Image: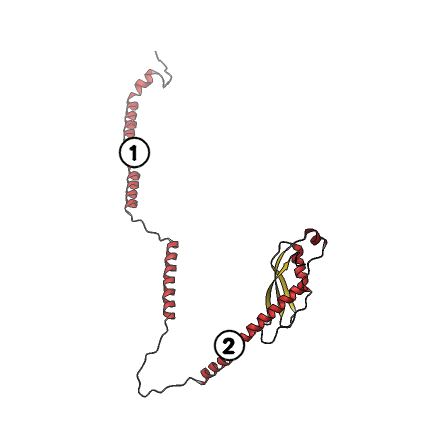
Amino acid sequence: MNHSLSPNIFSTYWFYEKRESISFSGAIALCLLVAVLWLMPKSYKEPVIAATEMMALLENMPVPQIEKPVEKKIEEKKVEKKIEKIENKVAEKPVSAPIVNDPFAENVSPTPAKQNKTENQAAATPASPPTQVIQQAVALAAKYESILKAYLEKIKRYPSSREARLARPEGIVRVWLELSRTGELIAVGIMESSGFNVLDSETLKTIKSGSFPAFPDGAFLGEATHKFIANMNYSLSSN
C-alpha cells in the first residue's frame, strides 16, 4: 500500500526527516551570532579610546594668551605722552654755547640787520607822556565830567504825562552815555532802573535831545570816544 504524502513543512514527519540539516544550519547560525557578538564590542571601543586620547591632548595643550587691542593702544598712548613731555622739556631748556676764554677774541657788535630791527622797535614804541601832561589830562577830564553832569541836571525835566501825574513816581535812574571827542552822542543806556518806566523813558529822552560840548584838548588822551555815568534823581520836592 503506497501512501502518498504531500510535502508539508508543518508536519512532524517532515521535521524528523530534516532534523540533521536543521541542526547543522542551527549550529552554524549560532556560531555566526556568537562571532558577531564577540566582534561588536571591539568595533565600538576604538572610537571611545580615540575620543579619550583626543580630550587628553586638548587638556594638555597650552592656552595661547590673546592680547587685548584696547590695552595695547592705551600703553602706546602713554608711551607717546611720555616722549612728548621729554621732548618739551628738552626744547624748553636753552642750549648755550660753551664759553671759551680766548685772549685774541674781540667784542663783536651786533649785525646791521639786528641794529635796524632794534631801532625800528624803539621808534615804533610810543614815548610815554610826562607826569605833568598826565596830571593835566586827569584834571581836564574831571572838569569835563562835572560840567556834563551839571548840564544833564539842568536839562532834566519831571515827566508831564498823565501816568506821571497820577502815580507821582520818585527815584534815581543810573544812566550811561558814550560821547565822541566832538560831543556827539554815540550810545546811551540804563544801568540801574528807578523802578518806574516813566522815569527811565524820560531820562533816555532827555539825553537824546541834549547838545553836549566837545572834549577839551588834553583830556581823555588816546581815546576817540569816552563813556560817562550819571545819576538822574527825580523827586517831587525838587520839581
On residue 79, which mark appears?
A: none
Three-letter residue code for mark 1: Met
Three-letter residue code for mark 2: Thr
Instruction: Please tell me how crowded label 1 is: few (under 14), some (14-19), or many (20+) other residues with Cα within 10 Å.
Output: few
Splitting the image into 4 quarters, where does residue 5 fall? Answer: top left
Residue 38 vertical placement versus 159 (above, below): above
Residue 1 vertical placement versus 60 (above, below): above
Residue under pointer 2: 131
Q: Position of residue 146 (x, y in %)?
A: 60, 68
The structure residue drawn at horizontal position 32% and vertical position 18%, both measured from the top left corner, is 15
Between discs 2 and 1, the one toward the N terminus: 1
Q: Nearer the viewer, residue 18 or 125?
A: 125
Q: Position of residue 117 (x, y in %)?
A: 47, 81
Which quarter of the rendered picture does the C terminus lie within?
bottom right
- Eye-nearest disc, 2 or 1: 2
The structure residue drawn at horizontal position 43% and vertical position 84%, both measured from the top left corner, is 111
Q: Is residue 222 visible?
A: no
The structure residue drawn at horizontal position 29% and vertical position 20%, both measured from the top left corner, is 19
Q: Nearer the viewer, residue 178 or 6?
A: 178
User: Element at badge 1?
Assistant: helix
